[in-house]
Amino acid sequence: MKKIIRFFLNSSIGVKLIFYFFLVILLPVITITTLSNLIYKNSMTDEQNANTQQMVKQITNNVDFYIKDTENIINYLSYDPTVLKFLSTNNINKNNNIEDDTAREITRFTTLHPEIAGIIIVNSNDMYVSDTMYRISRDPLTDEKWYTQAVKSPNNVQLFSKPVGRNINNIFEYCADDVVSMSKAIIDKKTGNCIGVILIDMKLDVIKSVIESIKPGKTGFVYILDSNGEIVYAPVNPVVYRIKKQWFLDKRNGIIIKSIKNKNYELMDIDSQYTKWKTVGVFPLDESLKAMTYIKYYSLIIAIVTLILAGILAIIFTKTIVNPITKLRRLMKKTEEGNFDIQFNSKYNDEIGQLGNSFNNMIREIRNLIKLVHIEERNKRKAEINILQSQIKPHFIYNTLDTIQWMAQEHEVEGVVEMVGNLTNLLRIGLNNGGEIIKLKYEIKHVESYLTIQKVRYEDKINYEINIDENILENNVIKLILQPLVENAIYHGIKEKRGKGKIIIKGSIENGKIHIKIIDNGIGIKKDKLREINNLLKEKDSSKRKIGYGSFNVNERIRLNYGEEYGIYYTSKYGKWTVVHIWHPILK
């Protein structure tokens, strides 16, 4: 296994890309094919169950509609004055007109509702009137089951599927399997007593048409059971009578899957809250499984064709990537051999084209650097001479001042000696042999020489005080960070104020940093100006600064060398004082 992995890793990038392309395509194809079949199967099953449930519910609603419509006819007849008059009569022979009028009212409804097979109205005196129904024997109709049950529950309509054994018949000779009967008692509003019952036979063809119009699948079917579990309607089917009632007692999620005659069926039932009937939908599972089998085969064929096409495209795409890389590798090999007169040409500006452009720029820069090396070598000696000449002038001034100091001392002119000495120290420490870092004690001596000169210049207008912690005097600092800030304090602070001025320089270690404060009792800085100065000191772009060069130079040199946590900032109270805070790292 290790040899195979090593062989693969040492293969060309083209082989690796083809393998990676094929692997990247293979995994999604397998995953998508598998998951899509599984998801489609579950989705199809859920959709089928939802459709079957919706279909069964729709059939239940339609049947309820016809039953409710028939009950409404009973309610209309129960309020009809003619019907009520008939129900209240005792002798029909004396009131033949009442019978005819009542029959006409019945006919009016049966004409408008062809689904009604017949209507019969029976009063409490066992007298009846109907359009198509008649008494078979002299036995009282008030003793019939449909009559007695209606009287017992006057507020509810009574439903009778397959009404056999009745003492009534229909002139059209409908059998018990052709109709569904409904009866309801009529109550006298004044006495509250039952004065009769209305019986309506509804044709079963109506329910049949509702069910047949909505058929689940090619071989599925729907049948209806009444509240007693007896079949109200079922198509001619050998399966329906093999379905057991107890199956509906342990159903889960409203779905039952059972094997009937070595074939699996899915059963779904919905109970009507109105009729208490149960509508059952039966759906053979092999129909959906057959569709899933076709989908699985088609998915497999599509996956294989996709992989073949993807493999061909992977080889083509790999060549478009590998060929320019191979060309670039050959050019780099020539560059290793010292040939810098080459160039990579690409038709496109993709990543490889950009890499080639970078290679061309690198070759161009190498050629330029080789030329620059020769130029730098020629100019090196010239630069050294220029630097030496730039140092001669300050050194010459320093040496001349030293001679003047010696001559003034020889002639005992002490003021001149001190003045020249301070200026000499100023130049000597400022030069510092070209170095940028000096000890803090020399930086203090440098600014003290500057203050001494300024004190002589301004006579008694300026006083100064230096109070530096001795423990930090041996630490290194960037040179010339105090003199520019002291100069600003004199020219922008003390000079602008009447009376004597004083500058105090303090230094100590705070929070692991060197903290130096330059305090003056000059004119101070206004709040807006102070805020502007401190904001500009935080700016990285030197083109945005509007403050003095000295303050910005000191701040930038400290921040550029040691980071933005160091540098300077101002605090001031206008008309009273100004303090420059210098934060510098501890450098041993």
Image (cartoon, rainbow, N blue to C red):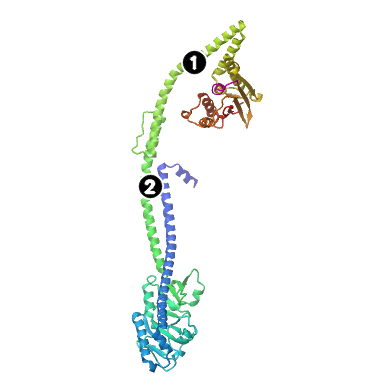
The Cα atoms of the two marked residues, 1 and 2, are separated by 68 Å
Instruction: Check disc 2: other Cα within 10 Å, few if <14, some if 14-19, many if 20+.
Output: some
x, y percent for residue 295 = 39, 61
Q: Where is 193 relative to 14, above or below?
A: below
Check residue 235 for magenta coloring.
Answer: no
Q: Is residue 82 above or below residue 307?
A: below
**Residue at horizontal 40%, vertical 46%?**
18
* Residue furthest top as drawn: 411
Labelled pair 1, 2 in contact (Cβ < 8 Å): no
Q: Is residue 586 among the parts visible in the rendering?
A: no
Please tell me whether residue 496 belongs to the stretch shown in magenta: yes
User: Which image quarter: residue 141?
Assistant: bottom left
Q: Is residue 559 above or below residue 106?
A: above
Q: Which badge, 1 or 2, comes first in the chain's sequence?
A: 2
**Who is closer to the viewer here, 337 or 313?**
313
Residue 364 appears in the figure:
yes
Mark 1 or 2, closer to the camera:
1
Residue at horizontal 39%, vertical 39%? 351
Q: Position of residue 285 (x, y in %)?
A: 42, 69
Q: From what the image shows, is residue 567 above or below residue 277?
A: above
Comparing 545 with 254, the one in front is 545
Q: Magenta region: which residues?
A: 490-500
Which residue is drawn at the image coordinates 41% and 45% (left, top)?
17
Which residue is outermost to the right?
470
Q: Position of residue 300 (x, y in %)?
A: 39, 58
**Residue placed under numbered mark 1 in the picture:** 390
How many numbered dots are placed on residues in this image? 2
- Label 2: state its secondary structure: helix
SS of the residue under disc 1: helix
The residue indicated by pointer 2 is 314
Give the amino acid type for the residue marked by disc 2 in the picture. Ala
Three-letter residue code for mark 1 = Ser
